[in-house]
Amino acid sequence: MPNIFRNLPSVNQLLENPRLKEMVDSVNHRVVVDGVRTFLDDLRDQVTAATEDVSIPTPQELADKIADWLETEEQPALKPVINATGVILHTGLGRAPLASSAANAVSAIASGYASVEVDLRDGQRGQRIRAVERLLCELTGAEAAAVVNNNAAATMLTLSAIAKGKEVIVSRGQLIEIGGSYRLPDVMECSGAKLKEVGTTNKTHPADYSYAINEETGALLRVHPSNFEVVGFTKSVSTRELADIAASHDLPVIDDIGSGALIDFSKYGLTDEPVASESIRDGADIALFSGDKLIGGPQCGIIVGKKKYIDKILSDPLMRAMRVGKMTLAALSATLQLYRNIDEAEQSVPILQMLSTPVENLKLRAEKIAVQLGSNPALKDVSVVEDQSMLGGGSLPTQRIATWCVSFASAEGSINSLAAAMRSLKAPVFGRVNKDRMLLDMRTVRPSEDLALVDGMQSIGKKPAD
């Protein structure tokens, strides 16, 4: 066994290999040296544990194996991908992409100092919410606003600030659970508020809230069931009805509208998604919603409403733990600016671009890409098919959007192997599998990505050059 180990090249010998030399320059000397040592140690362990004779690779073979391994290890886990799944708000792929102006704003703010908590007019310290509060109030009709890191945080913070130690009345049909183990009763318990359920799963009446109110009541809560629908024999209480009940008892109404649209999505054929301004107009004292779903901004939770309640929220000790940084504020501000002109928003905010693109355009793009992919021997039966996209992100789960897809099967293996090859591309491609066929949904592929999509898919199955 010792004689076998003597055949192993030294670390310094391996570092003289051209590929590893190049990696030392492009990655980092220490990283490459540590990688070579780790690889050699693992190889020694394999040889020691082997029950049969083991062939030791040549120095060149070893260097190539180490270089291949290091190249894989040094790939960043977070990288841009092409979303061809047809799920517009794909949680696994980062939900809504930012508008170019928002991305540029992040870049400008991130590379230096910024007036995050300084008032440029008098030089005094201010609150970071000022960067976006005026725009949020303008677009929703609210008196004041706050921004935290996501809508779950917005819910917990609001309940803590407004109703800690008090009962919060909510319909049983709105005790939601969404992805990532978010359960409303658990969030309420963590906030210090006490859950008081009223009504039944499918029916809750105004009288149910009225009968439940007592001296221990801190707020009435309405929650939009974003990721499910109860249909049939149902009854729910509207925000306006709830506001009337709360007003007669001097209690606040908290309206968690979930995904948080700033405009009416029925123009895209999508109905029943609550709009933030309508919540405020209908009497909600506080409205909560996401910034990274239907608005198409950065991940954040937005709280808008009456100033007396927002002031309590901003002064709650949890606020500091949940506040957002300068990059989120920059992206949100730039995104909100676009919504001051809906035509401009539709042209600039990617989610609105996707929803407003005519299906005829998608069909033409799909046909063009199908022709280009038809010559790839790794793919077979390439065709264009009509299908349906979906919003995703817990929004409007039963509603679909017409689309066109490039459809094909794998000519060289299973469809799962093909999907893995697509994920390993320089620009990874995510499609959706349907009955052993891969679909590339053009609704979620941006036109600027078409060339990279084709180039990537064409490289699948090609033999590497010698």
Image (cartoon, rainbow, N blue to C red):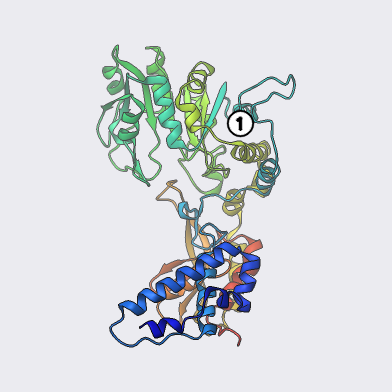
Whether residue 466 sits left or right of residue 386 in the image: it is right
Look at 69% across and 46% down and name the residue there. 104
Residue 50 is at least partly visible in this image:
yes
User: In the structure shown, which secondary structural element does the residue marked by tag 1 occupy?
Assistant: helix
Nearest the eye: 38 or 461: 38
Look at 31% across and 34% down and name the residue there. 186
Where on the picture, by quarter, is residue 246? top left
Residue 114: give x, y in percent of width and height.
69, 34
Where on the picture, by quarter, is residue 29? bottom right
Residue that lies at the very extreme toward the right in this rendered image: 121
Residue 55: give x, y in percent of width and height.
40, 87
Residue 428 is at least partly visible in this image:
no
Q: Is residue 439 above or below residue 168?
A: below
Residue that mark 1 sits on: 139
Specify the amino acid type for callout 1: Leu
Look at 59% across and 69% down and name the residue there. 453
Residue that lies at the very extreme toward the left in this rendered image: 200
Nearest the eye: 272 or 119: 119
Residue 320: give x, y in percent of width and height.
50, 28
Q: Is residue 162 above or below residue 27?
A: above
Please identify the quadrant where the C terminus is shown.
bottom right
Label 1: few (<14), some or many (≥20) within 10 Å? some
Q: Is residue 97 above or below residue 440?
A: above
Residue 335: give x, y in percent of width and height.
63, 41
Q: Is residue 294 above or below residue 79?
A: above
